[in-house]
Image: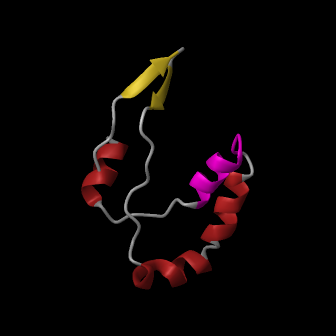
Amino acid sequence: MPQEDALISNGVSAQTQGGTPLPLPDDRGADALETIEFGAVLDLVAAYAVGPLGAARVRGRRPTDDLAWIRDELG
């Protein structure tokens, strides 16, 4: 997944364009995500968001199996 250039302000990088990797198809991950209570975890993290739009963005996150994107992020 291409990433936009980050803005650096006071040593903290900020993305100019947010995004989340493409989610796994529902049939490949729904049971696993339910088992690990992924939705509940997203709700906990969303509670720390600055506002409702940020919370909605957190709740919209989904895991990915895009190996190129994962390697780039870990790099």
Quarter of the figure that contains the C terminus:
top left
Residue at 33%, 36% in the rendered image: 4
Q: Nearer the viewer, residue 61 or 34?
A: 61
Q: Residue 41: which quarter of the image? A: bottom right
Q: Position of residue 49 (x, y in %)?
A: 69, 45
Q: Nearer the viewer, residue 32 or 51?
A: 51
Left or right of residue 18, residue 33 in this image: right
Range covered by the magenta-colored residues: 49-59
Disc count in the image?
0
Residue at 44%, 80% in the rendered image: 26
Residue at 61%, 69% in the rendered image: 38
Q: Nearer the viewer, residue 65 or 16?
A: 16
Q: Nearer the viewer, residue 54 or 67?
A: 54
- In the rendered image, the residue lying farthest to the front is 53
Q: Position of residue 29 (x, y in %)?
A: 46, 78
Left or right of residue 66, residue 49 in this image: right
Is the image coloured rainbow, by chain, by secondary structure, or in one colour?
A: secondary structure
Residue at 51%, 81% in the rendered image: 30
Instruction: Assess whether residue 34 is covered by the magenta stretch.
Output: no
Q: Is residue 30 above or below residue 75?
A: below
